[in-house]
Image (cartoon, rainbow, N blue to C red):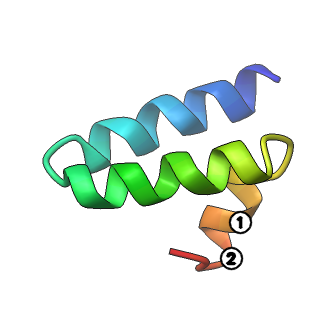
Amino acid sequence: SLKAHLALVDLYEKLNRDKEAAAVYEAIAKLSPDNKVVHYNQGVL
């Protein structure tokens, strides 16, 4: 959805200076592409 896409854009901007966190997020995204925003918001990272 557009809302989820914008949330991801915002998230990637926030993580831009932290490559390790971005890599962890990418791993979660690949494991659960439909729920990556939910997982992040629930504090998986």
The x and y percentages for residue 27 are 56, 52
Mark 2 nearby-residue class (10 Å; few <14, some 14–19, many ≥20): few
Mark 1 nearby-residue class (10 Å; few <14, some 14–19, many ≥20): some
Q: Secondary structure at mark 2?
A: loop
Separation of marks 1 and 2 at Cα, in angstroms: 5 Å
Which residue sits furthest left?
Answer: 17
Q: Amino acid at mark 1?
A: His
Place residue 30 in its image quadrant: top right
Q: Secondary structure at mark 1?
A: helix
Q: Which mark is residue 42?
A: 2
The x and y percentages for residue 32 are 80, 51
Place residue 5 in its image quadrant: top right
Residue at left 26%, top 59%?
A: 20
Q: Which mark is residue 39?
A: 1
The x and y percentages for residue 19 are 22, 49
Place residue 39 in its image quadrant: bottom right
Residue 4 versus residue 27 in the image, above or below: above
Residue at left 82%, top 23%?
A: 1
- Tell me: 13 left or right of 7: left
Residue at left 43%, top 37%?
A: 10
- Tell me: 10 left or right of 28: left
Pointer 1 with pointer 2, Cβ within 8 A? yes
The x and y percentages for residue 13 are 30, 36
Which residue sits furthest top?
Answer: 2
